[in-house]
């Protein structure tokens, strides 16, 4: 299994859009599990998920936290609309292992800040799979969010290593500048993907039939990393 994390330090920059469209494209060729760790559960709502895995471990209520569509499996990690606390790590890992059992590619959609629930998920992933790594895809928009991302992106590996000291590697697979209108300052990073502003996505919201032509460029970068991991 290879894991990709959609990261960004501000809400509203399009992380969930990128996570979903990338997952749906990859699911044409691989068995993909998309883990929704975002506070708003935008993707999970599109798939009709009302509960979260962490909520279910806590109260054993409705098992409505996983949905499947072809080769794509969507897991809602947590529903913040109800009170929730951190579950036991080993119990979480046991359930997580069963969900991830047939997964070839895992993609996580993340909140702007990596909180204690993100920490729990990463530790449970390590316990469930026997190893941990991170292929990061940073998403930002021009202006202040871009500056914040450039300032703080190098802190992510340190945070992950503090959670799981034996993390195998951390690698940036792509740096996405989303909703571009006009000129953008020179950005000193490689593997940039520039996505122009698409008003229809902003006004209609993310849907299961949403499309971005530029996602193909991201897919190429991701599949290059998949090939490297298999070699």
Image: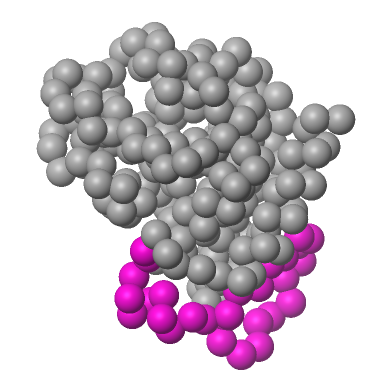
Q: From which residue to which does the magenta span run?
A: 180-207
Residue pictured at 33% horizontal, 33% vertical: 66
**Outermost front residue:** 70
Q: Quadrant of residue 199?
A: bottom left
In the rendered view, tell whether residue 186 sits above or below residue 226.
Answer: below
**Outermost right residue:** 231
Residue 131 in view (yes/no): yes
The spot of residue 227 in percent (x, y) is: 80, 39
Location of the C terminus by quadrant is top right
Location of the N terminus by quadrant is top right
The spot of residue 33 in percent (x, y) is: 49, 36
Q: Is residue 89 left or right of residue 158?
A: left
Residues 225 and 102: in front is 102
Q: Is residue 83 left or right of residue 199?
A: left
Residue pictured at 54% horizontal, 48% vertical: 23
**Outermost bottom residue:** 182
Q: Is residue 57 left or right of residue 16?
A: left
Q: Is residue 89 left or right of residue 53?
A: right
Residue pictured at 78% horizontal, 60% vertical: 190
The spot of residue 93 in percent (x, y) is: 42, 15
Does the magenta-highlighted stretch encompass residue 47?
Answer: no
The spot of residue 59 in percent (x, y) is: 14, 20
């Amino acid at each position: 299994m290879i894991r990709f994390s959609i990261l960004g330090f501000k809400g509203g920059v399009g992380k969930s859009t990128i996570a979903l469209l990338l997952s749906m494209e990859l699911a044409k060729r691989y068995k993909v599990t998309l883990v929704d760790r975002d506070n708003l559960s935008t993707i999970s709502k599109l798939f009709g998920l009302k509960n979260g895995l962490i909520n279910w471990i806590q109260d054993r209520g409705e098992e409505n936290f996983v949905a499947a569509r072809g080769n794509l499996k969507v897991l809602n990690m947590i529903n913040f609309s109800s009170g929730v606390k951190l579950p036991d790590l080993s119990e979480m890992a046991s359930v997580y292992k069963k969900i991830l059992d047939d997964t070839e590619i895992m993609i996580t959609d993340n909140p702007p800040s990596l909180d204690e629930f993100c920490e729990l998920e990463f530790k449970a992933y390590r316990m469930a799979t026997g190893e941990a790594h991170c292929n990061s895809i940073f998403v930002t928009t021009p202006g202040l969010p871009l500056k914040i991302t450039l300032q703080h992106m190098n802190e992510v590996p340190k945070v992950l290593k503090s959670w799981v000291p034996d993390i195998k590697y951390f690698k940036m697979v792509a740096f996405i500048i989303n909703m571009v209108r006009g000129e953008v300052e020179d950005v000193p990073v490689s593997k940039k993907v520039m996505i122009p502003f698409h008003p229809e996505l902003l006004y209609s919201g993310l849907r299961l039939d949403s499309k971005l032509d530029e996602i193909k460029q991201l897919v190429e970068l991701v599949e290059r990393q998949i090939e490297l991991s298999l070699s």
